[in-house]
Image (spheres, rainbow, N blue to C red):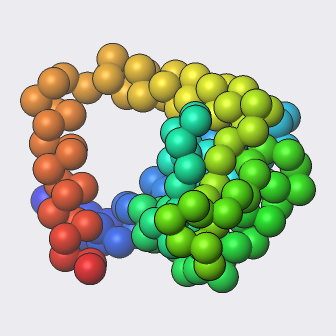
């Protein structure tokens, strides 16, 4: 051993997230989308309304950040807010037809990298990777 310590987990994760974010931002930019906007669109199933608070929890976002994202996506015509028939104070978020098309494009771009990773890793490595991410996630709750 040459006395050099391996990088801390937090640095490895941060650096990987930055590279991943840059990778996707470059691919999403021709569609005027950012990673947070794209992830939000992926969480809304076509034809089904989603509660904004539920979406915020799934994406680990503050409600104020979610409101800003929804405002920007609505302004772009990708989502629509509709009253929740079960809760007159609430709204549901739906994809517009343009939003469905954007979601399909995003899904294709995400699946491209996923396929590359699956080609580069063995099934056992993928299983271990998922387990490690799960452990990391549980440790930082």
Q: How many marks?
A: 0
**Quadrant holding the N terminus:** bottom left
Looking at this view, is 46 or 107 the one in front? 46
Q: Farthest right residue? A: 75
Question: At 41% across and 20% down in the image, what residue appears?
Answer: 115
Question: At 57% across and 61% down in the image, what residue appears?
Answer: 85
- Give the x, y percent position of residue 51: 53, 63
Does residue 92 show up? yes
Question: At 51% across and 48% down in the image, what residue appears?
Answer: 43
Q: Is residue 84 above or below residue 27?
A: below
- Give the x, y percent position of residue 72: 82, 61
In the rendered structure, the answer to whether residue 29 lies left or right of residue 107 reads right
Q: Farthest top residue? A: 119
Does residue 2 show up? no
- Give the x, y percent position of residue 136: 22, 66
Question: At 52% across and 22% down in the image, what residue appears?
Answer: 112
- Give the x, y percent position of residue 50: 53, 55
Looking at this view, is 30 or 102 the one in front? 102
In the rendered structure, the answer to whether residue 34 lies left or right of residue 108 reads right
Looking at this view, is 117 or 3 the one in front? 117
Q: Is residue 127 above or below residue 120?
A: below
In the rendered structure, the answer to whether residue 102 lies left or right of residue 41 reads right
Residue 52 appears in which quarter of the rendering? bottom right
Residue 58 appears in which quarter of the rendering? bottom left
């Amino acid at each position: 051993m040459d006395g050099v310590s391996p990088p801390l987990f937090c640095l490895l994760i941060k650096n990987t997230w930055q590279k991943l974010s840059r990778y996707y931002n470059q691919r999403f930019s021709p569609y005027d989308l950012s990673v947070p906007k794209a992830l939000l669109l992926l969480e809304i199933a076509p034809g089904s309304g989603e509660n904004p608070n539920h979406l915020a929890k799934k994406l680990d976002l503050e409600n104020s950040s979610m409101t800003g994202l929804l405002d920007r996506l609505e302004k772009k015509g990708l989502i629509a807010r509709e009253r929740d028939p079960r809760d007159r104070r609430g709204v549901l978020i739906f994809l517009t037809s343009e939003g469905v098309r954007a979601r399909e494009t995003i899904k294709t771009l995400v699946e491209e990298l996923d396929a590359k990773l699956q080609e580069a890793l063995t099934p056992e490595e993928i299983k271990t990777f998922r387990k490690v991410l799960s452990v990391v996630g549980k440790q930082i709750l």
